[in-house]
Amino acid sequence: MIDIKQLDAAAADFWPQLEKLLDWEGVSDEAVTNIVREILAAVKTHGDAAVIEYSQRFDRVKAKTMADLEISLERAKAALESIPHAQREALEAAAERVRIYHEHQKQDSWSYTEDDGTILGQQVMPLDRAGLYVPGGKAAYPSSVLMNAIPAKVAGVQELIMVVPTPDDEVNELVLAAAAVAGVDRIFAVGGAQAVAALAYGTETIPQVDKIVGPGNIFVATAKGMVFGTVGIDMIAGPSEILVICDGKTDPDWIAMDLFSQAEHDEDAQSILISPDAQFLEQVKASIERLLPTMERKDIITTSLTSRAALIHVENMDTAIDVANFIAAEHLELSVDDPMAMAKKIRHAGAIFLGRYTPEALGDYCAGPNHVLPTSRTARFSSPLGVYDFQKRSSLIQVSESGAQSLGKIASVLARGESLTAHARSAEYRLKDD
Amino acid sequence: MIDIKQLDAAAADFWPQLEKLLDWEGVSDEAVTNIVREILAAVKTHGDAAVIEYSQRFDRVKAKTMADLEISLERAKAALESIPHAQREALEAAAERVRIYHEHQKQDSWSYTEDDGTILGQQVMPLDRAGLYVPGGKAAYPSSVLMNAIPAKVAGVQELIMVVPTPDDEVNELVLAAAAVAGVDRIFAVGGAQAVAALAYGTETIPQVDKIVGPGNIFVATAKGMVFGTVGIDMIAGPSEILVICDGKTDPDWIAMDLFSQAEHDEDAQSILISPDAQFLEQVKASIERLLPTMERKDIITTSLTSRAALIHVENMDTAIDVANFIAAEHLELSVDDPMAMAKKIRHAGAIFLGRYTPEALGDYCAGPNHVLPTSRTARFSSPLGVYDFQKRSSLIQVSESGAQSLGKIASVLARGESLTAHARSAEYRLKDD
């Protein structure tokens, strides 16, 4: 019998119990911090030489020069041509859908002109150069390459540089193929904090980027946190989560598998199901029992479900929505009859999967929207990775001679109220003598 | 004679010199970090009691309860009615212009429907609740209250909570007046790291917010950095900067005063002038010499100009643009004949002030655009504070039964390629038997 937490939203201590269930503190290890600080400093000072040394030490690569560590685009294209045809087709179809969806996110410059000729607006520009971190080994997901790279290219980023560790010189063909499909511009076989440092500061060979995106282990996450400010970074993600709200009318096996699809990521992943139908919750539990032994990653799933999952009974759908808004889940499935009506009441979620035919897995790979989403309740204030993360704005202010007269007087009063008299006089210089 | 750096873009060592000029490292003090960590933990554990104790200790307030530390909206409105009429008019005029400008930034939900009935889009929602930190004492700027509060209210944030220290129970009437004008919902006379902690974790009296914005001293900045993740934060700003590009045809006194208006902020502020006209640079230098003794804040201005300012000679405007794009200045004035044509070549700047009648001061107070801008070259990847900082997006994915057939096959192939078989099976469940 698998032991999954069962909560009842009508219980007196439900909300504190829920808060405890969601509680997650990333480990901040002083040893990691010190190692990363040392690596960052070494790469900042010694550039390529440090990158090569760390890659030899940590990833046991044979490379002697940075040229050895650069993977050519030809090599990536060769990977794309070498993978099974079905995989290539799937990668290309997914990339095309992701591209079309993200085109909708592109923001344009705008401005308006006032009666006195004053022009106000914002100029929207892509970042010049972005860096994409791709984990090596087991956690290497070609789908993540698409999801991180395509928004950058749609935004118009001129140079997208991918870094990916190749421990023992082992290269992941699917990852290289995805890079070719996504339009990555340069690839370096470098990983860890040294890769983040190289992208943040630049070396003789690796150009400095303006923003670093992509998932990584604790060394990579710590390094990203430390270089933030020198470059932009995306969110530092916690464990992945799914919250399913079901009215009890979806096949319980489907829901069990949707919960598994989250739980199989890692032991800390969180799967939660909410239903007003107590019997349905029991049915899903039975499905879990029955299906679990058939799963390839059953050990990970079991640990994840027993330590972090929950089945929550609610009195009605209004309570389900309240709970969902509190959880602010990364992935929220609304497996109900009129999911769009319910979605309008959802204030916080990374991605909302509507209807019984929209399992999270479709969004993870190929529906079009991004799978890089805010975790750990940060959907209260964060958004999915998007084209907007690779664009930035400059305010445009062109005050006409006539506009300077009215604005100058207002600015002068306010600046003097703040004792900033150079500000006031700078505005007053533009006033004509009355 | 004031000693201002003069650089020539044609010099062999110009670019490294420029990089050195811009170099800025915020001090990260271990003592500060430890104090802030202690304050955060105390407020998290003891709530109101800790907030009151720290306010008594650090700000010497007489308050015994949180009720004593809440400033009513009636009190703020009274402040607005008590300030000089010209100041009230200026505040209200500025607020109205800022509001109109920011209305243009509001983003709407969007979606599209594919041929098979699949719906994809993004739902845009305001944050529920935001916190606004306002510094007390000398650095209390009513204009900053407007600039931080108005975008939140335009976004639709339901509850905007302002915190402002009142050392020795001294209240800044202009700041309260600005809060009334901007539509702040609640005000607490609390500052420092304890205010940030209260907003981030919530106390019995102060509600937890979703994002904290606004400038503060090193304790506030450190606290914001530490609570990031639990709540959202805005950028942590470095010293303010202005870069003026002038063709030599603007009154040199105007340009000198524009440089002063940045330098008067604090000793670390940076003012840079670029011109292809060497004689004009000399004229501005003469204006600086002549005007400096007349400035109220001449000591601050002198320190700022001698330690961080520069006059840069360039051969032509193309080089000026290259330098400007490298600097990625917070404020960029284009004091030239056709500033809009030049602006189109500017890839990186927080705000661009176009033409001889647009000194930075007008943008600081009342032109409409936000004065919270990316500093220290972060305009390469960051944007002005805006309505978009108080909105967030949820992806919408509603796959039709028919759509699930094609997408399910793609997802299945990709998921199996990543050895995520629960993902694959979750997608496959939605496939009809062929």
Image: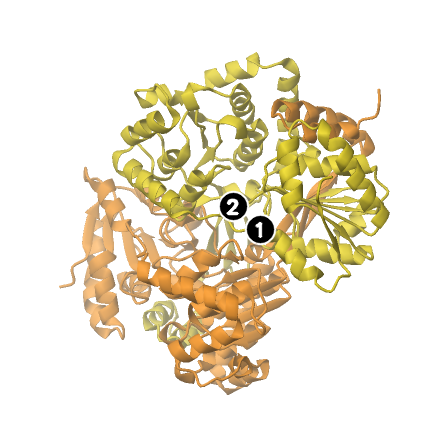
Chain colours: A yellow, B orange
Residue placed under numbered mark 1 in the picture:
A382
Q: Residues within 10 Å of mark 2 (few under 14, many from 20)?
A: many
For the point 39% across and 26% down, the residue is A59
Residue lying furthest left: B1
Q: Residue B226: x, y in percent? A: 44, 57
Residue type indicated by callout 2: Met
Q: Residue B121: x, y in percent? A: 69, 42
The reply to whether dot 2 and dot 1 touch (C-beta < 8 Å) is yes
Between A6 and A197, which is closer to the camera in this rendering? A6
Residue A235's tag is 2
Q: Quadrant of the N terminus of chain B?
A: bottom left
Q: Secondary structure at mark 2?
A: loop
Q: Residue A237: x, y in percent? A: 53, 44
For the point 68% across and 35% down, the residue is A261
- How many tags in the picture? 2
Task: Please indicate whether residue B8 sits to the left or right of residue A136 in the image.
Answer: left
Between A284 and B196, which is closer to the camera in this rendering? A284
Q: Chain of mark 1?
A: A
For the point 48% across and 55% down, the residue is B384
Q: Residues within 10 Å of mark 1 (few under 14, many from 20)?
A: many
Task: Please indicate whether residue A433 sits to the left or right of residue A107 in the image.
Answer: left
Relative height, residue A141 to residue B330 (above, below): above
Residue type indicated by callout 1: Ser
Question: Can the viewer see residue A106?
Answer: yes
Q: Secondary structure at mark 1?
A: loop
The answer to which of marks 2 and 1 sits earlier in the sequence is 2
